[in-house]
Image: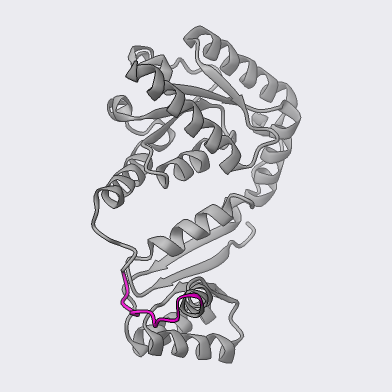
Amino acid sequence: MQKKHQVFLVSDSIGETAKIVFQTALTQFDADDFEMHIFSFVKTVDEIDNIIFQAKQKNASIIYTIVLKSINEHLKRQVRKYGIISQDLLSDTIYTLQKISGTLPVNIPGQNRLLDEEYFKRMEAIEFTVQTDDGKSLVRLKEAEVILLGVSRTSKTPICVYLANQSIKAANYPIVYGIKVDEELFRLPRKKMIGLTIDSEKLLQIRKKRINTYKVKSSSKYAEISSIRRELDYANRLFQELGITVLNTSNNAIEETANIIIQLIGEEDTKTSF
């Protein structure tokens, strides 16, 4: 099995800024190639040294949001000393704003984590999306603002994660050929559902790459074009039966499809308000 790239997200606060930036950037790559580790509330030199030790052991890279000046500088010295690939997400922007404003930053960690309604709404949406991923909690689907349906590898989960970071409660439900869809799905409002499809050849490429990464037996029907077409036809018939909007993800980046969905949600909200 191909080893995953290890990425340490290090913060002197909760670390959501680094996580959001990392996950957004990750949509441009194969997420299965990376493994994320979060180190929150890091505020001492000893903690930094321990993280550096682990990074050397795992050959990991470090992405960080360290506001505390002394800790930031120590981390910078250590990554240079040991040749660790790293990215400081805050310092350059803070310095630029300092030049623009002519004032000094307060250098207090966690200032972005103001405990307002929007913050809690986003955290609630992220928690909901994790708990309902891949149809894990059917009883909670009625709480969703949007439910994405599709066969395996149509980007259901990464799109849901993107939407959750926009404070949207997004759930997804897998369509599996030969397995009857749960009746609970038919009791939910159709306006909440969006079907995701993809060109068969594109899906074949994605699944072959996944098989090569995880060394699955080549005889698996998971990456056979005839099986893929059968799955997609099955899903499309279900979408027609449900009468829901269908989006083709073949040529769209994750954020492009997500923004289309956000627009569709907004249009539904407008209809409901009249």
Q: Position of residue 211 (x, y in %)?
A: 66, 44
As for residue 106 lying within the magenta part, the answer is: yes
Q: In the displayed structure, does residue 194 sit left or right of residue 210?
A: left
244 shown above or below 33:
above
Residue at point 41% right, 37% down? Answer: 133
Q: Residue at x 42, y 44 (%)?
A: 166
Name above or below for residue 246 compared with residue 91. above
Q: Judge by depth and name the residue closer to the eye, 209 or 115.
A: 115
The C terminus - image quarter: top left
**Apparent side of residue 247 relative to residue 223 in the rendered image (left or right):** left
Q: Depth check: give the residue in front, 57 or 201.
A: 201
Q: Residue furthest top?
A: 241
Viewport quadrant of the N terminus: bottom right
- Indicate yes or no whether the magenta region holds residue 83: no
Q: Position of residue 95 (x, y in %)?
A: 50, 79
All told, the count of numbered labels is: 0
Vertical placement of residue 242 versus 55, above or below: above
Q: For the point 66% across and 49% down, which residue is it? A: 215
Asked where in the image residue 130 lies, by quadrant, the reply is: top left
- Render colour scheme: one colour
> What secondary structure is the stretch in magenta mostly built from?
loop
Q: What is the x, y in percent for residue 86?
A: 56, 76
x and y, in percent, of residue 84 in the image: 58, 81
What's the magenta region? 100-110
